[in-house]
Image (tube, coloured by chain):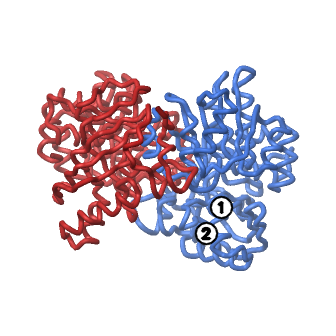
Chain colours: A blue, B red
Amino acid sequence: MLKGNKYGIHRVIEPQGVLTQAAKKIDNDMTKRYSNEIICDVISLNIDSASFTQIEEACDKDIEKIGKMILDIVNERGKMQNPVTGSGGMFIGTVSYIGEDLDTDIQVGDKIASLVSLSMTPLRVDKIKAIHPEIDRVDIEGQAVLFESALYAKLPEDLPEPLALAALDVAGAPAQTAKLVQSGQSVLVLGGAGKSGMLVCYEAMKRVGPTGKVVAMDYSKDGVEELKRMGLCHEAFQASAALPVEVLDKALELNDGKEYDVSICCVNVNNCEMSAILPVRDGGCVYFFSMATSFTKAALGAEGVGKDIDMIIGNGYTKGHDKITLQEIRENPAIREVFEKKYV
Amino acid sequence: MLKGNKYGIHRVIEPQGVLTQAAKKIDNDMTKRYSNEIICDVISLNIDSASFTQIEEACDKDIEKIGKMILDIVNERGKMQNPVTGSGGMFIGTVSYIGEDLDTDIQVGDKIASLVSLSMTPLRVDKIKAIHPEIDRVDIEGQAVLFESALYAKLPEDLPEPLALAALDVAGAPAQTAKLVQSGQSVLVLGGAGKSGMLVCYEAMKRVGPTGKVVAMDYSKDGVEELKRMGLCHEAFQASAALPVEVLDKALELNDGKEYDVSICCVNVNNCEMSAILPVRDGGCVYFFSMATSFTKAALGAEGVGKDIDMIIGNGYTKGHDKITLQEIRENPAIREVFEKKYV
């Protein structure tokens, strides 16, 4: 049996010399089996929020058109990578094949969630069974491949599967927050009432401790009230992240006029870079978790306003990110309730 | 006297709620003077290359038409921001007014270069004196405003002006390298033979010291030879940064098979993210200085290959970046020679 490349390079069709994420088209033929791949029977796709929003808008929210657009993308590219946003999502499935060269603690039949993006994962969709626009989820019949370097999590037995999946989808954000935020810091979370935002707020509250401050912003007034009610921040305010002047004014007002040590952007719309940059002090840090972030707008924006800050590209992976995130759901019944209500 | 907003928001005419760069029209009335603004008599505009090319083509390379188009843009918008490309450039001028609320080491009469984009700088053009299409430069009579947060550099007396400008154009990269790279580290520089790459290599060599290692990659074979000859790295190799598999193999080979602590990407072409990510160890750092970097490709790419690394958006500004960069040019006659030959 053939052994594939650790990073999946053997499945790149075009252009050659790149990895599967950068490739225009990858090989989703699962009759080919490699000794260091895992093949899963896919149950559902959790489409990345920026991608789903783009598809929804392009299809005038018509469910049939959305289904056809998703099928077209997968048939064209061999993966569910939105050609406009570049982003993917994740899948949940049952392990149907484990290559003999792999050293793993999962077994055939285990239900797992992929923790690598669909934008690089070979996927074949045989049938779309249902689309759930309110949770960016698509139930399908089909198969997907996990490479040797790929990340995945066996779904926990003490949490319902859709709940675990919803949390794992944004596992990078709270885990990176845990690494980044220090005791006593002031932290601004943009889009705090969203899926990743809520986990980020909760983790930030734990990290800053009694001497720090967490201020959350959200576009939705209900979201702002919810964050306050749930105790996920010290202060919260309503604003549009695309209007940086307003965000700056309100954010500083709630931090005694002082600039923040850290801001974390979880808002999945365009032109939010300056709202994350302006409220941060020189020497502070901006962590962009939104896939709608523009590299050039951030780089030129910070320079334009003379901000000597570190700007970090949200890495969806950090060691143990699945465990950190699932633990948050276990620990905080209020977040669990919201996740069960909104994202399951 | 009125004090303006630190970021210049007081000069936004429309739409309200954004900064001057995103604004359609800003206020270039210099009879209004604010206590935290600097006003300069402009000598020349260095139009951004993408913008100048667009204007040149729209005007059939007719110098008079180009002049009129530039005047029209500035009169319409209050700034020299090309409505098609969105880009600006920078200006050179003499300081004519310094607001009393500013703490600065420049004086009225000093010759300075703006280090913020013309796309966000209030500008009034009274007269176009000469247009130099071969260097995208326009000599004018007029005035420009620098806000409290704006960056500028006093032009040094010991370096020719075009040389200083060429170096200041990429000042962020070597200064960020100085902050980032530690003694004893292994550093991979992609695009090492380019304008910013050479300064980055030189700074990295200083920082890693005798116990560290700097390996440079460049697309040009001549560039690779030049880097070696100039002693700007320990090792150098030729490759295309858009082909990460090849870069990974060659980079590891030159570092005794080990992954790197830091990689710095200075390659201004698309799809170089994975070449910067793959060779770095878990816990290491990737610094993206190229404006061609895709946020999503970096974020999803690192996740896709399970790399637990910090990825930093190259901030064009860090404290003292102009001084660090000009000092490199002074210190290293070989770099100065290359800059004078290629970029002046």
Q: Which residue is mark 2?
A: A30
Residue B102 quadrant? top left
Residue A27 percent across, percent down from the top left: 53, 69
Q: Which residue is mark 1?
A: A39
Of residues A1 and A123, the one drawn nearer to the viewer in this rendering? A123
Find numbered disc 2 in the image and state the secondary structure of the residue it sits on.
loop
Of residues A103 and A29, the one drawn nearer to the viewer in this rendering? A29
Which residue is rendered at x = 48% and y = 54% of the image?
B23
* Crowd around label 1: few <14 · some 14–19 · many ≥20 (10 Å): many
Of residues B173 and A274, the one drawn nearer to the viewer in this rendering? A274
Residue A32 percent across, percent down from the top left: 57, 68
Quadrant of the rendering where the N terminus of chain A is positioned: bottom right
Earlier residue among tags 1 and 2: 2
Do the numbered discs 1 and 2 sit on residues whose CB atoms are within 8 Å?
yes
In the displayed structure, A116 sits above or below B186; it is: below
Residue A315 visible: no
